[in-house]
Image (tube, rainbow, N blue to C red):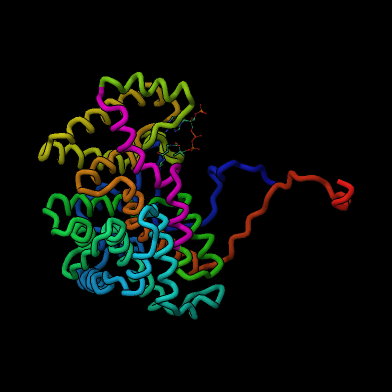
Amino acid sequence: MSDFLPGLEGVPATKSAISFIDGEKGILSYRGYPLETLAENSTFEETTLLLLDGELPTKKALNDFSQQLKDNYRIKYHIRQMMRHFPHTGHPMDMLQTAVSSLGMFYPGTECLTDANSCEDLDYVRNMTVNIIAQMAPLVAMWEHIRNGWDPVNPKHDLSVAENLLYMFNGEEPDPLMAKIMDVCLILHAEHTLNASTFAALVAGSTLATPYSVISAAIGTLSGPLHGGANQRVVGMLQEIGSPKNVESWVDEKLKNKEVIWGMGHREYKVKDPRATILHKLVEQLVAERGGHLDDMFDTALKLEEVCADRLGHKGVYPNVDFYSGILYSEMGIPEDEFTALFAVARSAGWLAHWREQISDNRIYRPTQIYVGSDMRDYTPIEER
Ligand code: COA
């Protein structure tokens, strides 16, 4: 029997051609393209097609795909009604998981998934994929209005996923800088090899569950604070620290109490996460243009990064993707508890790319365990216990 490795660290659980990480050098690529290149030149729509199909699309393929997404922005009336009945205190990730799993009842048709080793109906796979990716952002934005007792803003079918997301959130079309930043954020969060939520998606997908169940499993897994849930905690942490001059004593106190610093550390990276480097530059750009209260939060973040490098650098603990994203989202008018839901919007592209890869060469996941319980024993009747 093989050794048990807690957290399955370093244990290959699948073969995949979708993305690649070199954690020592701080490299992340999607289908062989460096993330930095995609962040600079691509769009979320194009990156999604690249993840799904493996190649950069032609202009026509991209236009068709973007149009298909736009045609799917609208959320069905009954789902909107259902959301009105959710408790308004419900967390956006719980709302999203519930709403996405309910989509499975509104968009049935899983016939092609009944053959365990192939999914021949590629139209079904593509249609469900488009349907889910297109509806994630509207669901998140609608919830912000519904939970505040307002009518949701209807989607605008001529806007990109990033533009429409901000439009449905704020009720007005975003300026080009904000739209570009949101688009880059979506690209950066779209895929990240076999993280916990993608693994959850693969396990669910391997049972030939519907893509709605697959994405629902992944959303639930992403919600935990050790995974996507960290980003919502970073802004609160920076506010709690308050100013660069408080950073050193704050970090020392946390480390003394064996508490984690949110947005720091990653299983795969032993250097600064390349996504954090790109987000760092975006915050710099925004601070240069907008300044104000952003300056304080950014200065505190910079000092925190410096102090953590000093105290935790020898353990390979540096800023991860969640460290700078919250600062950007706050500036876009997005409440903190919606940050992880935005992560899910983007990651739906990667999850579905992995789902498709899984079902095209499927074997159900069924790992083993090392039993550490008692030997066989006699049952004692309750009167004698
Ligand atoms: N703050 C303080 N110490 C940290 C840390 C953090 N954020 N992240 C890791 N460390 C320390 C651990 O305490 C451990 O120290 P030790 O060897 O003295 O016990 C060492 O670094 C290795 O960390 P470990 O927890 O074993 O790494 P992991 O691969 O199991 O966990 C995370 C990775 C992401 C769960 C972990 O870094 C973490 O909790 N980060 C904060 C949450 C977060 O930002 N998550 C988002 C990830 S994108």
Q: Is residue 21 left or right of residue 143?
A: right
Q: Is residue 340 left or right of residue 154?
A: right
Height in image: 157 above or below 246?
below
Q: Which residue corresponds to the image point at 23% horizontal and 32% vertical from the top-left?
A: 297
Q: Which residue corresponds to the image point at 27% horizontal and 71% vertical from the top-left?
A: 74
Camera sees residue 30: no
* Number of numbered discs: 0
Residue 73: name its quadrant. bottom left
Residue 90 vs residue 129, the one in the foreground: 90
Camera sees residue 91: yes
Q: Is residue 84 magenta?
A: no
Q: Is residue 172 left or right of residue 259?
A: left
Residue 143: name its quadrant. bottom left
Residue 25 location in percent, x, y? 37, 37
Height in image: 347 above or below 208?
above
Dominant secondary structure, magenta: helix
Residue 169 vs residue 30, the one in the foreground: 169
Residue 72 location in percent, x, y? 28, 72
Height in image: 316 above or below 144?
above
Q: Which residue corresponds to the image point at 52% horizontal and 69% vertical from the top-left?
A: 209
Q: Which residue corresponds to the image point at 34% horizontal and 47% vertical from the top-left?
A: 337
Height in image: 74 above or below 295?
below
Magenta highlight range: 215-244
Q: Is residue 241 magenta?
A: yes
Residue 134 location in percent, x, y? 30, 67
